[in-house]
């Protein structure tokens, strides 16, 4: 039986009183976690990485999020009990469910789904009205216009319409660019807010050929920042889109643009804002990933707070980072519409005197659906409703994606490719988006799309040597566990079907992956050739079946689905690491 609203409020009120998020005493008395109260004179609302999830979902946080070197034991690299202890969250509460994987299936039944644009719209409207519309900015950190069939079918435009209805003031991006430059620019023209990205410039060849740019002399493609009069003060927001766009995705989508972290350029922009532009507050809206933002904050002076995304880390309290100019707070807002960041700034002349930060979980059972947004979401989904609702199979166990080295839903994708494409080994990218499925729940076509809806979805089958397979694995592993955050790109380890292995995260490049063994017990032979299936290739041309068709065909023949066994990863050297729960 689903809990009543009163029961949920009682449980949530108890977790709020535990000190997870600052609450005025009247909020605790009312047992309403959304009764945040106004603080300061400027309010920023921050959403990020919704990945096109227009309706409420379950989304399991990782049980493996390993930090190495300086990142060991530091947020976001805490999971489970270590996470709760660090942030002072009581076990068994709604907050514990929102922020960790603990007892996920049981807690998901208790607290219900999270997110959904109609419920998010209700919360945004409430918090905007509380602070005053003239005192509030709504910021979107990107990865909002991709990740569902609705987003894919409309090539992002449907999500633009939802962004406009929410009233997004400014955004930056990542997967939005994988629709290609022409469509991306068309979507930006339909977007009523301002797109900002200080780190996108024309390539030398594109500049020579007169490609479109905001500033042809410098080659800057987009507005680097906005300045808005908010609460009677000049608030600047800098945009930082995903810095590795042409590496992580096919170069053909944005052939004329070059990216990067551009730390030196960032400092110039901040100095200009602090100087000639007379900004009273400087905010960075980032899609770098949290580890990159933490390093950036230590090296660039003058930023008051970084509102980050990309790595999908839901962190209840921002991290304070010292730098040559003083300090910067670094926050990250989770994913899939589960959270809304609320930043209350006390802004004075030329400085921020105080910051109060709340990462509010979006429990759909506690927030009535906004009628206008609900109608728009329904209209966007209606043309595909019958197809999306098709029940392909049921989950025999909890299916989830997020985790450094493996996820049960990813394993299902690998199983599907191995069977349908007659492959010995399957590779699936370590994307961090995609809802979870509780045991016994239906796996619908909507869910399959929510794990696979990209613009380069075609499957492939290739003959690969054991040595080549290991090289790929080592390369992805170095991207994940390299001790220098500026080398990391933010995804998880490539998922392997038909192949078990051991991983030593603290090892060196080329020496982290060992004990590669096929599921029949034989060792992977470096010189032998294997039949390997995969999808989402950055380099191979498209032309095969889209992966969602392959997975759907497989699921229709399964009934109840459990990932094949054995399929495992042994992690070495991580005992006692607070980012690892066995």
Image (tube, rainbow, N blue to C red):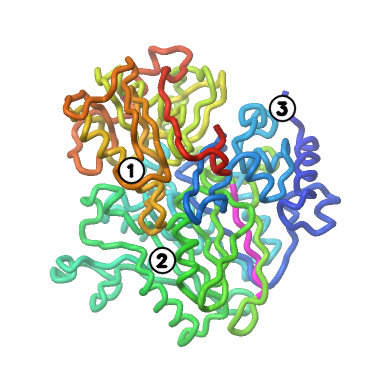
The residue that mark 3 highlights is 2
Q: Quadrant location of the N terminus?
A: top right
Residue, x 58% and y 42% (percent of image)?
A: 79
Question: Label 2 crowding class (10 Å Cα cut-off): few <14, some 14-19, many 20+?
Answer: many
Q: Position of residue 215 (x, y in %)?
A: 28, 75
Q: Nearer the viewer, residue 17 or 476?
A: 476
Residue 166 against residue 4 in the figure, above or below:
below
Note whether residue 403 is visible: yes
Q: Determine whether the residue tagged by mark 3 lies in a helix, strand or loop.
A: loop
Residue 216 against residue 4 in the figure, above or below:
below
Mark 2 or mark 3: which comes first in sequence? 3
The residue that mark 2 highlights is 196
Question: Label 3 crowding class (10 Å Cα cut-off): few <14, some 14-19, many 20+?
Answer: few
531 sits to left or right of 86: left
Q: Nearer the viewer, residue 500 or 340?
A: 500
User: Does the magenta stretch mainly form a helix, a strand or a loop?
Assistant: strand
Between the C-alphas of marks 2 and 3, the distance is 42 Å
Q: Position of residue 172 (x, y in %)?
A: 42, 60
The residue that mark 1 highlights is 476
Between the C-alphas of marks 1 and 3, the distance is 42 Å
Q: Determine whether the residue tagged by mark 2 lies in a helix, strand or loop.
A: loop
Q: Residue at the bottom extreme?
A: 276
Asked if residue 294 is among those painted magenta in the image, a careful observer would answer: no
Q: Quadrant location of the C terminus?
A: top right
Q: Which residues are magenta?
A: 339-346
Residue 208: assigned label: none
Mark 1 or mark 2: which comes first in sequence? 2
Residue 189 against residue 412 in the figure, above or below:
below
């Amino acid at each position: 039986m689903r809990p009543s609203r009163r029961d949920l409020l009682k449980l949530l009120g108890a977790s709020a009183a535990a000190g997870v998020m600052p609450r005025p005493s009247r909020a605790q008395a009312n047992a309403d976690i959304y009764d945040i109260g106004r603080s300061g004179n400027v309010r920023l609302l921050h959403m990020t990485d919704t990945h096109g999830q227009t309706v409420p979902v379950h989304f399991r946080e990782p049980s493996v999020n390993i930090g190495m070197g300086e990142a060991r034991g530091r947020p976001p690299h805490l999971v489970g009990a270590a996470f709760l202890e660090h942030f002072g969250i009581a076990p068994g509460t709604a907050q514990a469910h929102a922020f960790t994987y603990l007892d996920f299936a049981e807690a998901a039944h208790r607290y219900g789904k999270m997110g959904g644009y109609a419920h998010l719209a209700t919360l945004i409207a409430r918090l905007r009205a509380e602070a005053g519309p003239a005192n509030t900015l709504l910021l979107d950190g990107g990865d909002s216009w991709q990740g569902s069939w609705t987003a894919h079918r409309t090539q992002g435009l449907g999500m633009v319409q939802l962004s406009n209805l929410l009233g997004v003031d400014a955004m930056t991006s990542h997967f939005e660019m994988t629709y290609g430059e022409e469509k991306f620019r068309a979507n930006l023209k339909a977007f009523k807010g301002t797109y900002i990205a200080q780190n996108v410039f024309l390539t030398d060849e594109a500049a020579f050929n007169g490609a479109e740019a905001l500033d042809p002399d410098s080659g800057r493609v987009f507005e680097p920042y906005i300045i808005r009069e908010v609460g009677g003060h000049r608030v600047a927001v800098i945009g930082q889109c995903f810095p590795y766009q042409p590496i992580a995705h096919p170069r053909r989508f944005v052939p004329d643009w070059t990216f990067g972290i551009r730390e030196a350029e960032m400092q110039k922009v901040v100095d200009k804002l602090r100087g000639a532009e007379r900004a009273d507050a400087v905010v960075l809206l980032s899609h770098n990933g949290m580890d990159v933002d933490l390093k950036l904050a230590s090296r660039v002076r003058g930023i008051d707070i970084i509102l980050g995304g990309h790595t999908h880390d839901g962190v209840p309290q921002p991290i304070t980072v010292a730098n040559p100019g003083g300090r910067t707070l670094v926050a990250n807002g989770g994913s899939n519409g589960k959270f809304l960041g609320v930043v209350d700034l006390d802004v004075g002349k030329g400085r921020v005197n105080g910051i109060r930060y709340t990462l509010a979980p979006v429990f759909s059972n506690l927030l009535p659906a906004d009628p206008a947004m609900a109608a728009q979401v329904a209209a966007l989904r209606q043309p595909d409703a019958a197809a999306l609702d098709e029940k392909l199979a049921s989950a025999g166990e909890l299916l989830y994606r997020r985790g450094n080295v493996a996820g049960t839903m990813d394993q299902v994708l690998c199983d599907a490719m191995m069977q349908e494409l007659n492959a010995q080994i399957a590779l699936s990218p370590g994307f961090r988006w995609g809802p979870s499925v509780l045991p016994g729940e239906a796996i619908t076509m909507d869910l399959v799309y929510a794990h696979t809806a990209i613009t380069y979805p075609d499957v492939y089958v290739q003959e690969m040597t054991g040595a080549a397979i290991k090289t790929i694995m080592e390369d992805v592993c170095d991207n994940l566990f390299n001790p220098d955050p500026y080398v990391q790109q933010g995804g998880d380890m490539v998922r392997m079907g038909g192949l078990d292995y051991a991983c030593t995260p603290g090892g060196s490049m080329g020496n982290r992956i060992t004990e590669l063994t096929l599921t029949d017990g034989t060792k992977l032979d470096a010189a032998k050739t294997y039949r390997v299936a995969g999808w989402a290739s950055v380099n191979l041309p498209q032309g095969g079946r889209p992966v969602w068709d392959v997975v759907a065909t497989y699921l229709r023949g399964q009934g109840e689905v459990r990932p094949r066994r054995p399929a495992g990863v042994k992690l070495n050297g991580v005992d006692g690491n607070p980012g690892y729960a066995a």
